[in-house]
């Protein structure tokens, strides 16, 4: 596998090695020792799969406490996937990384604990799969406004389909209870 650093050192883009022939292809989507060698060491305890249509934007979400690290990928379709550093005191607080994940590049993105995550669907539909190192805890979920100008994400869509929670999410500056740098 190839690990690609990003502008925020904790966020990694991973390109699994693909083996293909006339029958199709094979790739390893996760292997403990290989991922641990790149700092992804906590055990994954929950897998999630969502299906969405073009124009849907999910996020920006995180949990605190009960922070989650997520290894995300696309099984079919295409998204713009985004992680935002929201750890109070971090030197990269408020900065984001955006990566196209699709069923052709087979890339994964590691979204560490303490980062908000979201994605915008740019294909007709998408099957989005992610592994989590902490269980979903709705009472600890935090949402941040998807179009916060202080974060400045260029999502590539103008009028996304949002959940009511995401449509009402506050700006990053107004969010209480964010994780602290060095504590997650």
Image: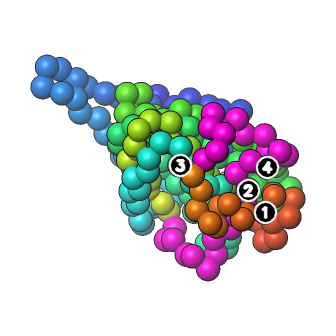
Query: Residue at left 50%, top 36%?
Result: 122
> 106 or 11: nearer the eye?
106
> 72 or 1: nearer the eye?
72
Q: Which mark is residue 56?
A: 3
The verdict on residue 126 being magenta is no
Q: Are marks 4 and 2 in contact (CB under 8 Å)?
A: yes
Q: Give the SS element for disc 3.
A: loop
> 29 or 141: nearer the eye?
141
Q: Give the SS element for disc 2.
A: loop
Query: Residue at left 57%, top 76%?
Result: 138
**Distance between mark 4 and mark 2 Cα atoms:** 5 Å
Q: Give the SS element for disc 4.
A: loop
Question: Residue 162 at x, y = what percent?
Answer: 59, 56
**Earlier sequence position, callout 2 versus callout 3:** 3
Q: Which mark is residue 170?
A: 1
Chain part drawn in magenta? 134-160
Image position of 110 (left or right of 74): right
**Earlier sequence position, callout 3 versus callout 1:** 3
**Distance between mark 3 and mark 1 Cα atoms:** 19 Å
Question: Residue 92 at x, y = what percent?
Answer: 80, 44
Q: Which residue lies furthest to the top in this view?
A: 22
**Earlier sequence position, callout 1 versus callout 2:** 2
> 121 or 101: nearer the eye?
121
Rendered position, 142 above or below 75: below
Image position of 26 (left or right of 112): left
**Distance between mark 4 and mark 3 Cα atoms:** 17 Å
Residue that carries the numbered disc 2 in the rendered image? 145
Choose mark 3 or mark 1, whichever is in front: 3
């Amino acid at each position: 596998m190839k690990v690609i650093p990003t502008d925020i050192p904790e966020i990694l883009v991973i390109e699994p090695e693909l083996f293909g022939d006339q029958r199709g292809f094979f790739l390893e989507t996760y292997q403990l020792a290989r991922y641990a060698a790149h700092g992804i060491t906590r055990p994954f305890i929950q897998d999630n799969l969502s299906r969405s249509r073009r124009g849907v934007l999910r996020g920006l979400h995180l949990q605190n406490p009960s922070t989650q690290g997520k290894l995300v990928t696309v099984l079919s379709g295409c998204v713009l996937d985004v992680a935002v550093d929201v750890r109070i005191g971090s030197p990269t607080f408020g900065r984001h990384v955006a990566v196209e994940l699709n069923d052709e590049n087979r890339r994964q993105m590691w979204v560490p604990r303490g980062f908000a995550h979201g994605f915008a669907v740019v294909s007709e539909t998408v099957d989005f799969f992610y592994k989590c190192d902490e269980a979903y805890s709705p009472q600890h979920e935090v949402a941040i406004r998807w179009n916060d100008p202080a974060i400045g994400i260029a999502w590539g869509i103008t009028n996304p389909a949002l959940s009511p929670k995401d449509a009402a999410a506050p700006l990053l500056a107004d969010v209480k209870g964010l994780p602290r740098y060095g504590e997650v």
